Image (cartoon, helix red, strand yellow):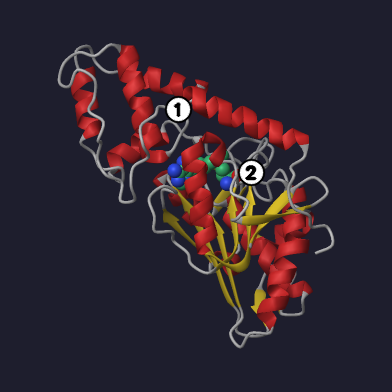
């Protein structure tokens, strides 16, 4: 791989990483992250059963959210916590905290609470430069290796997929790359046919059950700065129009992902801090724009998880400020303005 080189990091990323780490140290409660399985709290609420102050309630909630989902509680999450805790009926704050403390981390009520704190912003082919580099340096290499196998396979994971755009983008990238390698044909209406029995498995997972339901429906609306803002022209063949809406008005035209792409992708709710992972022997894993919310320990844990599910030589793709701090896990490959990582 001609463009590949190892760390040191360019100054911009290193500085950002230092700022992130400092912010995490300043804002992160010191309680340990919950063990896999999502145990109930080991951290009793303040003034259990009584009337805690709003400040105490928010500190306790921050610690719980950090412990159970890895968030480093920063300004915007703290503001949301203050609003939610402040909206409890008078005299009920203590019993509400007791109730939350008794819930398992996978309990629907706890997950609904956490969903109020998360951001689901995403779109197809988000960060085109990174997708392009993945295609040229990772996907083509994986396909070339797999081609020589008796049962070639492509296993891809979008590890915080939100409403599914990233997972479907990965599936589109994969079939395009297979076609370019002479392993598949795609017609103008988006029908995909592989020329040999390839196993293509794309998994999208996210903490949010609501986001996963949207991802499974695979219907996306075209308006404003919507999910299609970065979609290259040739990828429109992977969508079928549903309904008769007008794309110039909100709630107008909507499109469903083509069945030949949908059948390659499955979705499941999964908390990155509560293994086991929904894939194994993955060739490429995307985990972007989520670790920025995690504290340093949570990030480290996710880097290790991703390393463990990749097959030898598999690739990991993170957000621009997410730099694995353990040099034994991955080797960095630098593109023009992006970096991807390969399991060593
Ligand atoms: C900003 S979106 C990123 C979506 C996509 N990866 C992208 O880059 O466009 C962040 C997603 O991370 C999810 N998330 C937050 N904490 C998580 C956790 N502990 N485990 C799994 N997903 C989590 C949120 O529900 C949200 O959908």
Q: Residue furthest bottom?
A: 150
Q: Is residue 270 left or right of residue 50?
A: right
Q: Is residue 152 above or below residue 66?
A: below
- Residue at x 40% of width, y 33% of height: 66
Location of the N terminus (image quadrant): bottom right
Q: Measuring from the top left, give residue 338's x and y in whole percent.
A: 75, 47
Q: Are marks 1 and 2 in contact (CB under 8 Å)?
A: no
Location of the C terminus (image quadrant): bottom right
* Quarter residue 284 falls in: bottom right
Q: Measuring from the top left, give residue 302's x and y in whole percent.
A: 50, 49
Q: Residue furthest left?
A: 49
Q: Measuring from the top left, give residue 17's x and y in whole percent.
A: 64, 34
Q: Is residue 49 left or right of residue 297?
A: left
> Is residue 195 or residue 223 the one in the foreground?
195
Q: Is residue 290 above or below residue 219?
A: above
For label 1, being within 8 Å of ligand 1 is answered no
> Is residue 5 or residue 179 the one in the foreground?
5
* Callout count: 2
Q: Is residue 136 above or below residue 39?
A: below
The answer to whether residue 129 is seen in the rendering is: yes
Label 1 and label 2: CA atoms lie apart by 19 Å
Reading the image, the residue beneath label 2 is 323
Q: What secondary structure is found at the residue carrying circle 2?
A: loop
CA neighbours of label 2 inside 10 A, class few (<14), some (14 to 19), many (20+): many
Q: What secondary structure is found at the residue carrying circle 1?
A: loop
- Residue at x 68% of width, y 71% of height: 142
The tag on residue 28 is: 1
Q: Is residue 254 left or right of residue 128?
A: left
* Quarter residue 330 falls in: bottom right
């Amino acid at each position: 791989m001609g463009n590949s080189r190892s760390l040191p990091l360019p100054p911009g990323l290193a500085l950002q990483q230092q700022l992130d780490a400092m912010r995490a140290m300043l804002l992160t409660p010191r309680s340990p992250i919950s063990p896999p399985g999502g145990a109930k709290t080991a951290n009793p609420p303040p003034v259990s059963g009584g009337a805690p102050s709003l400040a105490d309630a928010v500190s306790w909630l921050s610690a719980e959210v950090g412990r159970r989902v890895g968030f480093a509680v920063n300004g915007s999450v703290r503001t949301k916590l203050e609003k939610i805790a402040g909206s409890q009926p008078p005299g009920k704050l203590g019993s509400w905290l007791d109730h939350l403390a008794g819930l398992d981390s996978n309990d629907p009520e706890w997950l609904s609470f956490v969903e109020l704190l998360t951001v689901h912003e995403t779109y197809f082919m988000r960060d085109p430069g990174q997708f392009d580099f993945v295609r040229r340096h990772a996907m083509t290499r994986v396909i070339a290796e797999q081609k020589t196998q008796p049962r070639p396979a492509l296993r891809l994971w979008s590890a915080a997929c939100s409403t599914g755009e990233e997972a479907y983008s990965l599936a589109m990238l994969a079939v395009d790359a297979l076609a370019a390698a002479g392993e598949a044909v795609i017609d103008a209406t988006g029908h995909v046919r592989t020329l040999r029995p390839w196993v293509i498995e794309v998994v999208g997972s996210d903490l949010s059950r609501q986001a996963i339901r949207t991802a499974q429906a695979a219907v996306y609306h075209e308006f404003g700065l919507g999910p299609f803002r970065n979609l290259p022209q040739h990828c429109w063949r992977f969508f079928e129009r549903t309904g008769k809406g007008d794309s110039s008005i909100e709630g107008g035209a909507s499109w469903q992902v083509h069945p030949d792409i949908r059948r390659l992708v499955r979705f499941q709710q999964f908390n990155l801090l509560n293994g086991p992972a929904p894939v194994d022997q993955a060739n490429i894993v995307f985990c972007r724009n989520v670790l920025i919310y995690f504290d340093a320990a949570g990030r480290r844990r996710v880097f290790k998880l991703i390393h463990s599910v990749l097959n030898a030589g598999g690739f990991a793709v993170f957000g621009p400020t997410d730099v694995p701090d353990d040099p034994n896990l991955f080797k960095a490959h630098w593109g023009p303005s992006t970096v991807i990582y390969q399991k060593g």
